[in-house]
Image (cartoon, rainbow, N blue to C red):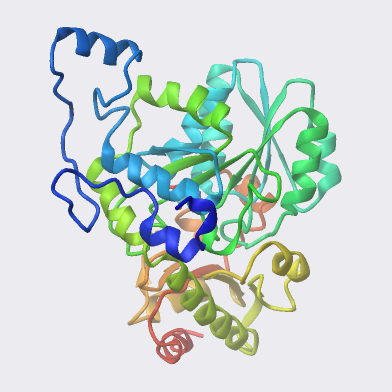
Amino acid sequence: MSDKELHPDTLAVRAGIERSQFNEHSEALYLTSSYVFDNAAQAAARFTGSEAGNVYSRFSNPTVSAFQTRLAALEGGEACVATASGMSAILSTVMGLMQGGEHIVASHSIFGSTVQLFSTVFPKFGVTTSFVNGPDLAAWEQAVTPKTRLLFVETPSNPLTEIVDIAALAAIAKRTGALLVVDNCFCTPALQKPLALGADLIVHSATKYLDGQGRVLGGAVVGRADLVNGGVYQFLRTAGPSLSPFNAWVLLKGMETLAIRMRAQSDNALALAQWLERQPAVERVYYPGLASHPQHALAMRQQTSGGAIVSFEVKGGREAAWRVVDATRVISITGNLGDTKTTITHPATTTHGRISAEARAAAGIGEGLLRVAVGLEHKDDLIADLSRGL
Ligand SMILES: Cc1ncc(COP(=O)(O)O)c(C=O)c1O
């Protein structure tokens, strides 16, 4: 049966399985760094690529391949390359597809390490980035130069859940000859399908919702086969920021419950956001599922729900924000997100603490801002936990 005939819930559980001679039911974990050849001629043929087959786990492993096949099926992508982390997915995309002298346009509101990578690492190799206000489509168009190779966007963004119109940005990318890369970390394919909206590539931090239980690091690049199997894979196989088979196996198991987790965590997040909006100590709530979100209509068009991240600004700046964090007893104080356990973060001093004050201000990350990545606990316990410090 082809993947195209199956519902995503089924693909999340079934796609990518290739049974060994032992007929195991659960996905096998192949912990091996290399593979044995029948003879010298076969070894030579495998190394040149004239014969298909595994050679070395830096660039191919059956468990990693199963993860790649499953994620490609869920995203509706032609191909997928797995990486050691979300950051190495972004690194491999740029190193694999760009040349010195070329240019990226990215939204201001992206993950702090992505800002760092674009503004301090890539310029060393002659790749520069212009940052624009994500929802302002005219700003993207104006920032494109003849050297622009990539448009890079996170939607919803971390941490302000800013929404960018993927289909409109894809049209700009096509018109200008650039590639559109979407970081689909916050929504995952369970809630949003950027490739169907015209994106060329998706990058993932699999560390987040694809695992969903805060256990392993991982990442992936999904999309057009010529780009993924061409430049991105060629960079990965040579430079080696590869996903470990063990992590791939954990991620495969995580993906089986992706859709039901995303639905349940989104429901919890909506309840929490609605409650936060009614609290006098809260200045503003950022959640795409709320009618008060400036891009609520767009979010509901390109996503199937608001997602599980709620950010909010408390009155009283850093002191008040830290008081809320320190008063929690159930919610975990940690930088990660995408876990079944709810987490709380003060972005200005943690995830976005290394970027410059100007970049933070441009991204709208104030001292009173808190980000809650809502998990699967009962919503009443989460509300009680936040109300302690508000
Ligand atoms: C939106 C987004 N993209 C990328 C990353 C980087 O992923 P990783 O930590 O797996 O390298 C993160 C991490 O928090 C993220 O939130």
Above or below for 318 versus 49: below
Image-quadrant location for residue 82:
top left
Expressed as whole percent of the image width and height from the top left, the position of residue 95 reads 51, 24
Identified at 54% across, 18% down, the residue is 125
Residue nearest the viewer, comparing 41 with 298: 41
Of 343 and 232, nearer the camera is: 232
Residue drawn 70% across the image and 59% down it: 163
When the figure is inspected, residue 216 is found, relative to residue 239, above or below; the finding is below
Q: Nearer the viewer, residue 180 or 286?
A: 180
Q: Residue 177: image x %, image y %? A: 76, 27
Can residue 353 be seen here? The reply is no
**Left or right: 271, with 170 as reference point:** left
Residue 298 visible, this angle: yes
* Quadrant of the image occupied by residue 180: top right
- Pick the residue in front: 23 or 127: 23
**For residue 53, side relative to residue 131 (left or right):** left
> Residue 290: image x %, image y %?
68, 78
- Quarter of the image for residue 317 reads bottom right
Q: How many marks?
A: 0
Please name the residue shown 73% across and 20% down the image: 147
Residue at 36% across, 47% down:
67
* Above or below, 271 relative to 261: below
Q: Is residue 199 placed above or below 373 in the rendered structure?
A: above
At which x and y percent is residue 371? 52, 67
